[in-house]
Image (tube, grey):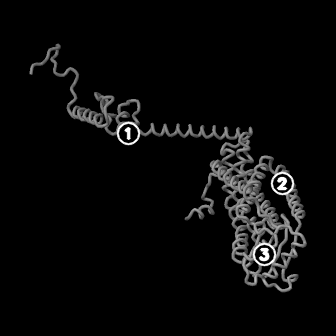
Amino acid sequence: MSMLGRLYRSEFHVDFVGRRRVWYTVSGVLIAICVLSMIVRGFTLGIEFSGGAVFQLPTNGGSVEQVEQVLADNGVDPADSVVQQLETSGQFRVQTPTLSDQQTEQVQNALAETFNVENPDENIAVSTVGSSWGSTITNKAIKGLIVFLVLVMIYLSIRFEWKMAAAAMAALVHDLVVTMGIYSLVGFEVTPSTIIAVLTILGFSLYDTVVVFDRVRENTAGMATSTRRTYAEATNDALNETLVRSLNTSLIALIPVASLLFVGAGLLGAGTLKDLALAQFVGIASGAYSSLFFATPLLVDLKRNEADVRALDARVARARASRARSEAGRTGRSVQARPDEGMAAALQSDDPDQPEARGSGDAVGVGGGLRPAAAGAGSAGGAGRGAGSLGGSSARQRGAKPRPGAGRRPGGKKRSR
């Protein structure tokens, strides 16, 4: 079946830990791009964070260029403003920098006159937010994030160990930077919905990492006496054992979020959903990646110099070397015990001390006067000579056996023929 089928049947093994330098490189490049974008491009802050005024009015057949011209005529720089034409509601949404009450009323009246809006106080919605409110919200969000990270660090240190907590926090920072960098690259507004989405993905990223770390702890629980796997191998096995679960969780979470982003915000034009959906979509995908390819390989690097881990790796190396030597010894004896069969028969037939190893051509059990085949003869020559000796002996056996002293006359003289 396909690779996906093998993966879901747990027949697919990925070397996450062995290729961790590749994953570090990918993460480093991605983080560098995101940080560079945040420095160069910055963020498009929503009115809740930057302050300003928002005008929402019917289009009545007007264009975005006309709105920008009205702003310029009333002393508002269009470059500092955001003008959106909402297709679903048939309205303009105009966001400007902070304006005075007089400027706000002036722009409202000018928009009503240009686009023929009757009763502007009712048909043009105006909302203003001070910049101090936005800075207050930003400071509270940062403080809340710091408190959250500290509490999570303490919990993970107690639940697991401080190195696992450090690896999980590093993965969490990785996800934050990637999500914020994508926001900067795309140019979406940062709104309170964005903050809510970021807090949501922090929990998701930690959940996936904790699931993997719990499996790592189970696989390395008996490492004080183990000789089967090194710490890196046990950790990599834990990743593969939880791989399907991580992918299933991520896919199930990404499908509805993708519907919000691509269908709700993209096709239906629900602009209020895109801030929430983009942060969740990027954060969930980044969290699934970091828990598999970043957090756990980083944990292996953090623990590689521990005395227990080094002792485990040394025991495993010695055990494998011992098994390799034993296997090599068995293989060597097996090869020596199976030489060429013809040569073996010849060598065995020349050994009078091993009668049980002789072949059918050996002269064993025949009457006196026989000699064994010449030592060192080949299989064919030895067999031939053995057969020849056997034939001559048989001929002498069939003849009359001479009596001692036959052919001599009494007195010791030979009898004449």
* Place of residue 223 in the rendered image (x, y in percent of width and height, measured from the top left): 72, 44
| Dot 1 and dot 2 residues touching (CB under 8 Å) | no
Query: Residue 175 vs residue 370: left or right?
Result: right
| Mark number displayed over residue 70 | 3
C-alpha gap between disc 1 and disc 3: 103 Å
| Earlier sequence position, callout 1 versus callout 2 | 2
The disc labelled 3 sits on which kind of residue?
Val
Specify few, some or many for label 3: CA neighbours under 10 Å numbering under 14, 14-19, or 20 or more: some
Sequence order check: which comes first, mark 2 or mark 3? Answer: 3
Q: Residue at x 69, y 45 (%)?
A: 231
Q: Is residue 353 left or right of residue 197?
A: left
Work out how far the residue at label 2 is from the one at label 3, CA to CA, in angstroms. 47 Å
Closer mark to the observer between disc 2 and disc 3: 3
Q: With respect to residue 126, does 224 lie above or below?
A: above
Q: Residue furthest left?
A: 417
The kind of residue on which mark 1 rests is: Asp
Q: Is residue 128 left or right of residue 240?
A: right
Asked whether disc 2 touches disc 3, contact meaning CB atoms under 8 Å apart, the reply is no
Q: Is residue 73 above or below residue 368?
A: below
Left/right placement of residue 332 relative to residue 200 reads left
Secondary structure category for the residue under label 1: loop
Among the 4 quarters of the image, the one containing residue 180: bottom right
Residue 327 lies, in percent from the top left, at 54, 40
Depth check: 292 or 287 in front? 287
Location of mark 1 (residue):
340
Q: Nearer the viewer, mark 1 or mark 3?
A: 3
Mark 1 or mark 2, which is nearer to you?
2
Tag 3 or tag 1, which sits nearer the N-term?
A: 3
Looking at this rendering, what residue extends furthest in the bottom direction? 118
Q: Which residue is mark 2?
A: 149
